[in-house]
Amino acid sequence: MQRQPLKSPCKPQMELDRISNLPCHVAERILSCLPIREAVRTSVLSSKWRYKWAMVAHLVFDNHCLSAQNRTTFVNIVDHVLLLHIGPIHKFKLSNRDFLATSDIDRWILHLSRSSIKEFILEIWKGNRYKMHSSVFSCQDMTHLELFNCLLRPPPTFKGFSRLKSLDLQHVTLAQDVFDNMVVRCPLLEKLTVMNFDGFTLLNIDAPNLQFFDVGGVFEDVNFKNTLNLAVVSIGLYEHVCNYQRRGPPGSSSHLLKFLAHLPRIQRLEIQSYFLKYLAIGTLPGKLPKPCLVLNYLSIRISFTDSDEISTAVCLLRSSPALQELEILVRPEDTTCAGTVNFQLDDDWNGPIARLRHVKINGIAGTKPELEFIRLLLLGSPALEKMTVKPASVTCGWEIVKKLLQYRRASVYAEIIYMDP
């Protein structure tokens, strides 16, 4: 008999070792989805995977990948990864709740500034503000910058970020001129978030490509310029406007008019905290001279103990013919800053809110101004499909239900849903 040649035992193993022969883009995709600790561990899979982790373009150091309770270990790990890294680093995120701001961050930022970084996220959760290293302001390839608990003092040579599209600043300190230049010198900026800031009090927004603006903090004024593309705005004033001059001299300009003058394409508007009080300052018209033609979603936090706030909200509703969704969040308010409410609405609302379909009202106490406001919405919304009402407490719930059942509705399809508080 003729002997059969022996088959090599390595061949089946080679055929089964598919992970070593994965296409490069597939391996990169797998590594990019893993925490940095797990990505480094893939070096034991095979000789081909030994240094693949070192070419990952997205580096994330957070609590999911390792703890910073041992500061020395954490710093050594970041140093080790950056030292052995091969190729460009497109994204770097440092967000560990146990890590305090140290001079080690300066060294890492300096290294990243030489690597064409595109996304930089730094969140310092403990300790004092971290003074941002000046080299970050030389990263001209950056498209996304996100900072938490930082102090910004750019060098005099800083001319802005020419490619930045998204800027997120929270719990930050920077001077007024620094904030103004940060916005105006980022010509491609599309998304801006500013929360809990200090060092400046004026929100001067000059950004021709801005589409999304989210702000919350203590400020004196907000001014829009060259913001014709701004579509989504969420703004909250955290300080009571009782400290401001609520009404100027007769004929003084309306803050509401000034606020909306440069927002012709606003589609979604959220008025939070005490910002409605700010908008109520000045002489208010019954209806805006230029309506918000594409505004389809409106959320308002309001006090029904303040007639100026109510009138401002009514003016905004009357000037929003495309409005489809409305959310009313009632703010419990003491009466020390508001006089007696003398509030009466007419019934001629069929035109301005003809497209309103969904209404949510949260936190009412069953007061006369609140119920009058609801009556108005039911009577003037012929396309209304659903109104959800949630009172502040159960004590006033039954009285509210009885009133709601008595009110006429312009829409035969309107459904009123009572939510138990």
Image: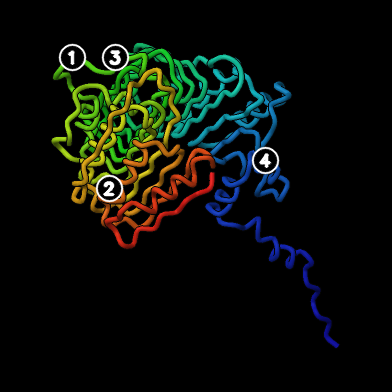
Tell me the residue that label 3 is attached to: 245
Asked if marks 4 and 3 touch (Cβ < 8 Å), the reply is no
Secondary structure found at label 3: loop
Label 4, label 3: how far apart the Cα atoms are = 60 Å
- Front-lying residue, 205 or 252: 252
Secondary structure found at label 4: helix
Q: What residue type is labelled 1?
A: Pro
Q: What residue type is labelled 3?
A: Gln
> Which quadrant: the N terminus?
bottom right
Q: Nearer the viewer, mark 4 or mark 3?
A: 3
Tell me the residue that label 4 is attached to: 40
Residue 249: mark: 1
Direction from residue 309 to residue 71 in the image, left or right: right
Dot 2: few (<14), some (14–19), or many (≥20) neighbours within 10 Å? many
Name above or below for residue 64 compared with residue 126: below
Direction from residue 304 to residue 284 in the image, left or right: left
Q: Nearer the viewer, mark 2 or mark 4?
A: 2
Direction from residue 183 to residue 117 in the image, left or right: right
